[in-house]
Image (cartoon, grey):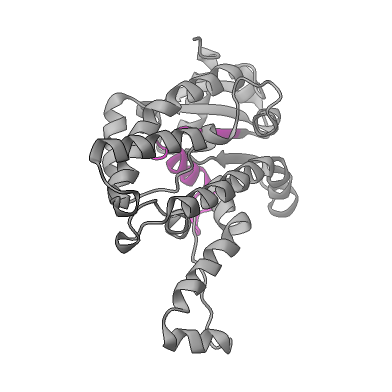
Amino acid sequence: MFYETEADWRSATRRRITLFGMSGLGKTHVSQILRGGREDAGEWFHYSIDYRIGTAYMGEHINDNLKREAMKVPFLAKLLRTDSIYIGSNMTFENLSPLSAYLGQPGDPAQGGLPMAEYERRQELHVRAEINALLDTPHFIERARDIYGYDHFICDTGGSICEVVDPEDPEDPALTALSDNTLMIWIEGTPDHAQTLIDRFSRDPKPMCYRPAFLAAQWQAYLDRTGTPADRVNPKEFAVAAYAAAIAERQPRYVAMARNWGVKTTAAEVATVRDAADVSDLVAAALGRGRPTP
């Protein structure tokens, strides 16, 4: 690990951590605390994987899709053709809606759904984008120091990191890049948290990335269970069902990531964090417990 002991962490002059786990368990909450506000900037550089995906790697796809929709409106189409207006997403660390909207959900087009083939194509784009964003972490560590003078760095990963890496492969490129340059920390949830996340997702869907075999199995199971034709599936209903299944399906991979590549904390512990000192204590406690055992 990047820091082997609590003492290593406490004495480090350059602190670097990567948080991973399901969306909604506190990764961005901790990152925002360390980053500080505009008027009171902290001492940490916040590298958001989802933001990097949505801007550097998926931004053109997102904006092209917005323009494609705008071209369906004659008034806007004329203005776009003459470069009279600009249409683009307004992605922020806190608002990933443009990425979520582009990825969409499969189902009935009349209900805002995508044909499964198109949904799978966008999923493939996201997989490549996420891997590239993870591999960019070492570059941003140096960039943060060279340009902005930040010695401390936090990588805020997306919940789907476990979909694009192999935690049992000691040479996995993305996990190697992260573990060679940061301490990887899993935020573990509980069954109670799982239901909270499902309820939150149903209100505000997050960018989701699924392994092809899992997606195919969930899609077929939904069709069999409901008897609904593929082009009449309620997109939101399927999305919530797939998300709920993903929480359980991802758990073993998160466990393997923590066991082979880092340490573990809990969502309950993260919820108590209020400032940078609390974060430091949180990481120290995780290191003090050592690597999780099977």
Is 126 or 254 nearer to us in this picture?
126
**Residue 197 visible (yes or no):** no
Residue 291 point in image, percent of width and height: 55, 14
In the rendered view, does 74 fall on the left or right side of 3?
left
Q: Image quarter for residue 101?
A: bottom left
Residue 83 point in image, percent of width and height: 58, 86
Residue at far left of view:
226
In the rendered view, does 270 fall on the left or right side of 173?
left
Q: Quadrant of the N terminus?
A: top right
**Residue 210 visible (yes or no):** yes
Residue at image position (52%, 30%) is 280
Is 94 or 283 nearer to us in this picture?
94
Q: Is residue 50 magenta?
A: no
Q: Image quarter for residue 2?
A: top right
Is 166 or 135 nearer to us in this picture?
166
Residue 260 point in image, percent of width and height: 60, 18
Residue at image position (68%, 28%) is 172
Is 167 or 68 nearer to us in this picture?
68
> Which segment is the magenta one?
17-44
In the rendered view, does 248 fall on the left or right side of 173?
left
* Residue 169 vertical position relative to residue 228 in the rendered view, above or below: above
* Residue 43 vertical position relative to residue 69 in the rendered view, above or below: above
Residue 180 point in image, percent of width and height: 71, 28
State how many labels appear.
Answer: 0
